Image (tube, rainbow, N blue to C red):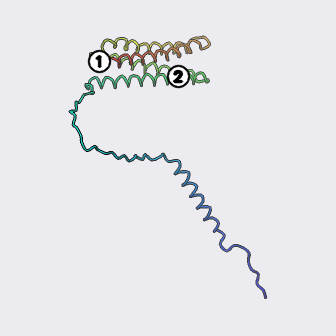
Amino acid sequence: MLSVVSKEDPKPGRWILPIVIAVLIGFTYVFVNALPAADIAASTTTTVPATTTTVAQTTTSSTLPTDILAFLQELDRFENVANDLQIELDSVNAAWEDGGDFDETEAGFIAVKDGAQELANQVAATSVPTVYLPAWPETITASQDLVEQAQLVIDGLKAPDDGTLRREAVAEYAVKTTAFNDQLDVVRSLTP
């Protein structure tokens, strides 16, 4: 008598291995291509001529005194703070324009004003090397202008108009930030 031969696959999971291998190859390809290119230093060969002449080297010192270097770093910090305050003011204003909450917007504008006041206090209290003294009073004034303009933004928010005063004050704050940064550049230009 003939026995019935089963047509079922005796190893039903053997199709999984090729799929796993294909997936691994695919992931490897994707991740390897996502890596940044390696820095490969080009090899250079130089030949030295048989006869050389020695030239006396003069060293020129381009280093600045530490007080001037510290002061220039402080100017960079002032500029970064002013730019961050500008970004924050624009962000708070944009949130208000998109239907934000009045109390949150007012608190955001007050935080910018407080930050501008802190910046102005730091500018006024900075120890200034002698070479920069002629331009420093204008820098103090430019920093104080940021505080006054931030207050005008707050006043514009509270004004009973259609928002025009606030928008104009926000635009003027950007102008004052640029003027402050330009004044910092004037101070930097006095570096010996």
Q: CA distance from mark 1 to mark 2?
A: 31 Å
- Which x, y percent locates residue 146? 44, 15
Q: Earlier in the sequence, mark 1 or mark 2?
A: 2
* Element at label 1: loop
Mark number, residue 140: none
- Give the residue pinned by disc 2: 90
- Which x, y percent locates residue 65? 25, 25
- Tell me the quadrant of the picture where the N terminus can be found: bottom right
Q: Residue at x 24, y 40 (%)?
A: 52
Label 2 crowd (10 A; few <14 / some 14-19 / many >=20): some
* Element at label 2: helix
Which amino acid lies under the numbered mark 1 shown in the image of this protein?
Val
Q: Nearer the viewer, residue 181 or 109?
A: 181
Q: Is residue 155 above or below residue 22?
A: above
Q: Residue at x 42, y 47 (%)?
A: 40
Give the left or right position of residue 5, taking residue 22 as reference.
right
- Give the residue pinned by disc 1: 128
**Residue ranking furthest to the front:** 51
Q: Is residue 61 above or below residue 143?
A: below
Which amino acid lies under the numbered mark 2 shown in the image of this protein?
Asp
Q: Quadrant of residue 16?
A: bottom right
Mark 1 vs mark 2: in front: 1
Give the left or right position of residue 55, taking residue 41 as reference.
left
Q: Nearer the viewer, residue 154 or 177?
A: 177
